[in-house]
Image (tube, grey):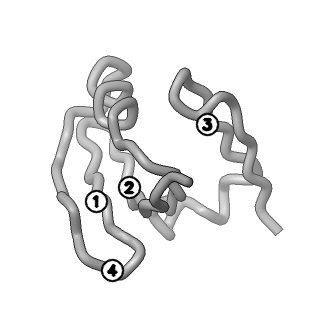
């Protein structure tokens, strides 16, 4: 069984803040990366564990469906209630 990790991110037009935490709330790391396909793929491809994603709160009212697709997760769809 893989360890669950929690990934928070705030996606901006030029940079993205990513924070990764353990189940107990301790921060593994936090970083700012440029918002580009290459940098985002790199930031999420090697997280390890079973990732649970939390998006920046300000944009959630505009997001009805978040799709995460990639070789490390397969394809998952998360619907808002």
Q: How many marks?
A: 4
Above or below: residue 15 compared with residue 17? above
Give the residue at x 48% y 61%.
Answer: 4
Say if mark 4 contacts mark 2, CB within 8 Å. Answer: no
Dot 2 and dot 1 residues touching (CB under 8 Å)? yes
Q: Residue furthest front?
A: 1
Q: Decide if residue 66 is on the left or right side of residue 79.
A: left
Measured from the top left, where is residue 25 in percent x and y?
33, 80
Report the Cα–Cα distance between label 4 and label 2: 15 Å
Question: Disc 4 and disc 3: Cα gap in Å?
Answer: 23 Å
What label sits on residue 6 in the rendered view? none
In the rendered image, which residue does mark 1 sit on?
Answer: 19
Residue count near mark 2 (Cα–Cα under 10 Å), binned few <14, some 14–19, many ≥20? some
- Which is nearer the N-term, disc 4 or disc 2? 2
Q: Which residue is mark 3?
A: 68
Q: Is residue 23 above or below residue 64?
A: below
In which quadrant will I find the N terminus? bottom right
Q: Nearer the viewer, residue 3 or 81?
A: 3
Q: At x 33% / y 34%, what residue is drawn?
A: 46
Residue designated by label 4: 25
Q: Which mark is residue 9?
A: 2
Q: Nearer the viewer, mark 2 or mark 3?
A: 3
Q: Nearer the viewer, residue 16 or 75?
A: 75
How far apart marks 1 and 4 lie (CA) works out to: 11 Å
């Amino acid at each position: 069984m893989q360890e669950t990790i929690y990934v928070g991110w705030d996606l901006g037009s030029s940079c993205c803040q990513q924070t990764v935490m353990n189940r107990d709330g301790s921060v593994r790391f936090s970083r700012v990366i440029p918002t580009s396909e290459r940098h985002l793929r790199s930031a999420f491809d090697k997280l390890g564990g079973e990732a649970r994603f939390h998006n920046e709160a300000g944009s959630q009212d505009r997001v009805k469906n978040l799709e995460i697709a990639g070789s490390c997760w397969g394809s998952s769809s998360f619907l808002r209630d």
